Amino acid sequence: MRVAEVVVDVAALQAPFSYAIPDALLGSVEVGTKVKVPFGKRIDYGWIVEVRESNDEADLKLKEITKSVSSGPSSEVVQLCIAASKLWGCSAAQFLKLASPKVSIRTRLERDPEGLGQEGFQQYTYGERAGVIWETPNFDEASWVHSLFEFHRSSARSIIVVLPNESRVDGLHTRLLDLGIEALRYPEDFQKMDGNPRVVLGSRSAIVASVGHLGAILLVDSCDPSMRDQRSPYWEAWRLAKLRSDISGCDLLLLGSAPPIEALNKELRQRSLERDRYTAGWSASVSYSKLTDLEGDQFKKIGEYRSIAAGIARRSGYPLDFEMAVIHNRKGFTSQLVCQTCSSIQLCEACGAVVHGVAEARIDPLLSRVESLRSKVVVDELSCSKCHATRPVVCMKCASRRIRPRRSGIERLGPTLEGVLSEPVASISKETRDHPQSKVVVGTEALLYRDLSAAVVVFLDFDDFSFSLTIERAPRAAYLYSRASRLVSHSKGLVVIQHSGSGDQIREALEAKDIRSIYRSELMNRKEVGLAPYRSFAKITGKKAQLYADQLRLRSLEQNVDNEVVEMGKDYFLLTAKDEQGMIRSLQAVVKPSTGVRIEMSPRSL
């Protein structure tokens, strides 16, 4: 009899279950097929991850597969999904969902025709297997994809191109069609993916596309937040792509102007095919950047930048989406509160987090049309959003009651700028879908992730990025600066950075236009402290985190391994290990509770 190992679509279950394959389905199921199986008292979906012959009497009592639902991922992608589930400590079903078509496909898809073996892969790779390629912010994605496809087409190899969002996928797809390349979209064109040389485009889920004989994976702007989304199952695009390149034996290219800092390790070699671009500075060829202090009349400065933006827009022959963009990474009406007497930011005395003002009534945004950014909004009490502690409106340092907002959000800033500039100002955030119609826009960092163009970009308070208390502050600041440079690259415009951190490594790097020095300093600091990429971390939270952490700590002592479990707070622990393999072995050695424990591999919110 033939037995199938099936991963059932139940998030709490990681191990596959054995089912007998009925005679009626012998010719229609294979590794990767999506099926229906009896599970307890109900029928659930699942994926076949292994098919084997069995003469064991115990297998005669197995339940049979109920129904074949659809063709699924190829055997290579199934192997990738299983390996990824072990790396991120989750069920393989979460990855198999990404790798399966959204609609049922009854026909069997041929994706693995005869071709070059492993030696052939090594012979035809486009740059010694894997590497980080530093580019200037205005690099041409279509040219890279075109040259990469032409290189691998001679050896009948496909390439997967991963971009941060669907709008950029749409733009690249149109440009490739103009170049005569019929690129496929993932997952829309799942059924068209076969063994012929193809270009497959998509967001980060395209990494698990079932493409036959893969020659290369190209990740564009792998430092973008959407490529590093830590939601369940907490996986990052470049790590999954590295895993697939190891399994497939294909090339891996991380292309961008600011790569993930963890990618700069011995496994991924840094390369720049046009090193002469960096002789005069990383961004010298695309934009002029200017650093200014936060002191003084900020509205007067914005008025001056508006005049500069209008002049650049007149000289530029490129059609711009808007002339000036003001970046302020806060929404709402109040943010950090500052004492007007001693200028100290108000923090929670219990946990040290920033406190916010709580007012009785909502502030009418129409009243802020001619108000300054430091408008005197009166609040009733101070509240901590982290530990929920409250206290009266009193400064902890000087006991003054003159507490005022340091900065208002974009909902207040937009109408305020309209009064100052005497022209319409549009606001853009992550939730905004419409294209801006104004020549001046104000928005959060989400504005930078869109494929737009401008003459001047002003970071109203760059301290929000460079002084954020997260492990990602340095690469995040570098990537935001690179995106701003890309926005103004067509007009050869201006990037203005208002900053107060004299002596800060990020400010020094931006002044010298040496973006790589941010990475050099950050890597040195991480090596001294013992952070990624020099050590691996797993974040354990949940109601049963204490029990699970105690078991991990006991097992580490028994096995005498270089792992450590650190208590960070109530129901919050960090497991540290020398490398990812040691981390995986520790997590697999202890049975994880089916509920009450959440594991986040390689967390960035440390």
Image: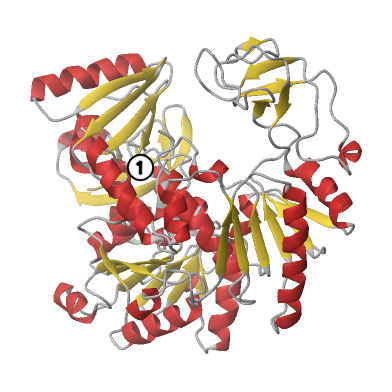
Quadrant position of residue 107: bottom left
Q: Quadrant of the C terminus?
A: top left
**Residue at figure coordinates x 50%, y 20% from the top left:** 352
The image shows residue 383 at horizontal and vertical percentages of 65, 17
The image shows residue 556 at horizontal and vertical percentages of 15, 23
**Residue at figure coordinates x 56%, y 42% from the top left:** 464
Characterize the local packing of mark 1: few (<14), some (14-19) or many (20 or more) Cα atoms within 10 angstroms. Answer: many
Quadrant position of residue 599: top left
318 in relation to 239, above or below: below
244 in relation to 183, above or below: above
Quadrant position of residue 10: top left
The image shows residue 175 at horizontal and vertical percentages of 57, 81
Q: Amino acid at mark 1?
A: Val
Left or right? Give the position of 403 relative to 588.
right
Left or right? Give the position of 117 relative to 186.
left
Q: Coloring scheme of the render?
A: secondary structure
Please name the residue that numbered disc 1 is placed on.
7
Left or right? Give the position of 81 relative to 223.
left
**Residue at figure coordinates x 67%, y 65% from the top left:** 456
Residue 324 visible, this angle: yes
Left or right? Give the position of 83 relative to 9.
left
Quick one: SS at disc 1?
strand
Return the residue nearer the eye: 445 or 464. 464
**Residue at figure coordinates x 52%, y 58% from the top left:** 481
Return the residue nearer the eye: 404 or 135. 404
Return the residue nearer the eye: 400 or 318. 400
The image shows residue 203 at horizontal and vertical percentages of 50, 60
